[in-house]
């Protein structure tokens, strides 16, 4: 009887042990699911934030583009058309030689105005960054600055250029716009130098100016919080596409911004 | 209390399962739940009859054999329906086919009138393997939907609790009944009580989860 009791007790212990294992398995699954749910929620939240930021970026690009267009119409096309109007007003049909000169001059001016309008209409398309590509969009942006004749603008592309993905191009372009806007507004520079390096595994974009510079010691130690919203936005957006945003500045010598994006060759 | 735990807790648990599955079927209208409801209702009737017979010391093994056969068929159907992966379905189908083959070879061909301990242990093992396959699928195909609101998860968790907890009790039955005399074997009734208690807990888990899911869906 003793032997039977011992064996029955052994079976009971084994059963209890397996019940504990079963409960453990069920708890493990529930814990795993909870963690998985947390991970999925965070992932979808991050995706939502990214899409929100991308949308904001598009709106900002559009806003900046409209500002540029407004300036272009006022400073360039408006001036050209005023000159044409002046020509027409001062035309004297009794003096054929000056009249012909003025007509020819007006023709040239109107052709220029038409060409400028054509260029502008391209940038009115909200997806022009996607259509033109990052390099041509930057070039277009630099052309606008060049036309003001206040800056010497240099743009160099090194390596075999390839397209980045839509989100990356949009965000990088918006960062470039912001940097150029800052140069115009604060740097008091005469030269703007933009370099794009297309490496098979990395894309590097460097923008530097020879302006007054500023104390960037906080940024060099990655303390972006101490700086304005513009710099913080650029840093955060770069992080969104896994790019590294670096800024260095020396007083009276200028500022350099470098954006490094790890990528695969997209030829 | 002891006769109830030994004889009537098992059909009572099946009755709880039947009520749960009936309510679940009324809510979800899933055929597999309807099939399970019919199975548990029949199991409650068969095992109740077997328990009444046992009180008169008559042989009720033939009723357990019917229950064993029915369980193998229904669990095969349920797991083939609930599993989504083709290989897993094939494994489930093969395992329960093996269980049925054991049933036919021992109960029909060899005309065994004793309780088929090994065959039942193989059946228990098959349910456990299929349950783990289900868990594996659940973890691999995790969605944002809360697992706690999945009735199949709770039902199968109950199966793991019962079938894993009572696996050794079933497996050892054959060994004990061959080694000890009838009087000594009476002590084995305690093991049946443990097994029935686990089945009761599993049935309560199914009923509780059903009510909780219904409450959660209502409050959403």
Image (cartoon, coloured by chain):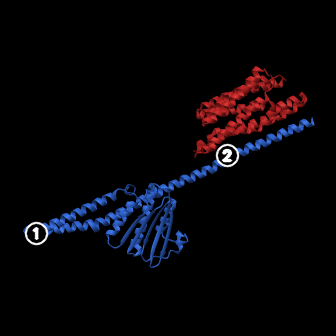
Residue B37, image quadrant? top right
Q: Is residue B176 visible?
A: yes
Disc 1 to disc 2: CB gap under 8 Å: no
Alpha carbon distance from label 1 to label 2: 94 Å
Q: Is residue A56 visible?
A: no
Quadrant in which the N terminus of chain A is drawn: top right
> Does residue A37 appear left or right of residue A54 in this picture?
right
SS at circle 2: helix
Tell me the shade of chain B. Answer: red
Residue A99, image quadrant? bottom left
Q: Residues within 10 Å of mark 1 (few under 14, many from 20)?
A: few
Residue B49 image offset from top left, x and y in percent: 76, 24
Residue found at the far left of this picture: A94
SS at circle 1: helix
Labels in figure, total: 2
Viewer-proximal residue among A198 and A62: A198
Q: What residue is drawn where x is 89% and y is 37%? A: A5
Residue B62 image offset from top left, x and y in percent: 77, 22
**Label whose residue precedes the other's in the sequence (1 or 2):** 2
- Residue B77's place in the image compared with A216, above or below, is above
Subunit ID for the residue under disc 1? A
Viewer-proximal residue among A200 and B55: A200
Tell me the shade of chain A. Answer: blue
Same chain for mark 1 and mark 2? The answer is: yes
Subunit ID for the residue under disc 2? A
Residue B152 image offset from top left, x and y in percent: 64, 38
Q: What residue is drawn where x is 75% and y is 20%? A: B108
> Does residue A220 appear left or right of residue A63 in this picture?
right
Residue denoted by label 1: A97
Q: Residues within 10 Å of mark 2 (few under 14, many from 20)?
A: some
Quadrant in which the C terminus of chain A is drawn: bottom left
Residue denoted by label 2: A29
């Amino acid at each position: 009887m003793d032997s039977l009791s011992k064996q029955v007790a052994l079976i009971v212990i084994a059963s209890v042990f397996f019940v504990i294992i079963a409960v453990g398995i069920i708890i493990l699954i529930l814990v795993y699911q909870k963690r998985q749910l947390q991970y999925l929620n965070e992932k979808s939240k991050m995706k939502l934030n990214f899409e929100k930021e991308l949308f904001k970026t598009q709106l900002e690009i559009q806003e900046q583009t409209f500002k540029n267009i407004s300036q272009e119409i006022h400073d360039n096309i408006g001036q050209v058309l005023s000159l044409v109007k002046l020509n027409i007003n001062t035309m004297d049909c009794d003096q054929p030689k000056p009249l012909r000169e003025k007509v020819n001059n007006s023709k040239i001016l109107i052709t220029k105005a038409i060409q400028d309008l054509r260029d502008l209409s391209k940038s009115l398309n909200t997806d022009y960054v996607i259509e033109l590509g990052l390099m041509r969009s930057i070039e277009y942006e630099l052309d606008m600055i060049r036309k003001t004749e206040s800056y010497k603008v240099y743009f160099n592309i090194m390596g075999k250029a390839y397209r980045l993905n839509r989100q990356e191009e949009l965000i990088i372009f918006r960062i470039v716009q912001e940097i150029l806007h800052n140069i115009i507004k604060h740097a008091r520079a005469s030269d703007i130098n933009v370099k794009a390096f297309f490496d098979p595994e990395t894309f590097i974009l460097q923008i530097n100016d020879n302006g007054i510079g500023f104390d960037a010691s906080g940024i060099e130690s990655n303390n972006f919080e101490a700086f304005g919203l513009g710099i913080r936005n650029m840093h955060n957006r770069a992080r969104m596409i896994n790019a590294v945003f670096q800024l260095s500045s020396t007083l009276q010598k200028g500022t350099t911004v470098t954006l490094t994006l790890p990528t695969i060759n997209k030829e | 209390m002891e006769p109830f735990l030994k004889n009537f807790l098992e059909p009572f648990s099946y009755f709880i399962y039947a009520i749960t599955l009936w309510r679940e079927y009324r809510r979800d209208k899933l055929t597999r739940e309807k099939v399970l409801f019919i199975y548990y209702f029949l199991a409650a009737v068969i095992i109740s009859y077997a328990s009444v017979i046992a009180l008169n010391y008559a042989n009720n093994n033939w009723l357990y054999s019917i229950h064993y056969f029915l369980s193998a068929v229904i669990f095969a159907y349920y797991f083939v329906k609930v599993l989504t992966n083709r290989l897993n379905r094939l494994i489930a189908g093969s395992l329960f086919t093996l269980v049925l083959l054991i049933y036919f070879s021992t109960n029909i061909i060899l005309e065994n009138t004793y309780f088929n301990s090994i065959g039942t242990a193989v059946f228990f093992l098959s349910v456990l393997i299929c349950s783990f396959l289900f868990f594996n699928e659940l973890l691999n195909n995790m969605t944002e939907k809360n697992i706690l609101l999945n009735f199949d998860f709770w039902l199968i968790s109950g199966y793991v609790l019962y079938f894993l907890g009572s696996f050794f009790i079933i497996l050892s039955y054959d060994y004990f009944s061959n080694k000890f005399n009838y009087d000594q074997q009476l002590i084995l009734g305690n093991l049946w009580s443990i097994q029935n208690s686990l089945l009761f807990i599993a049935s309560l888990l199914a009923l509780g989860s059903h009510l909780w899911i219904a409450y959660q869906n209502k409050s959403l």
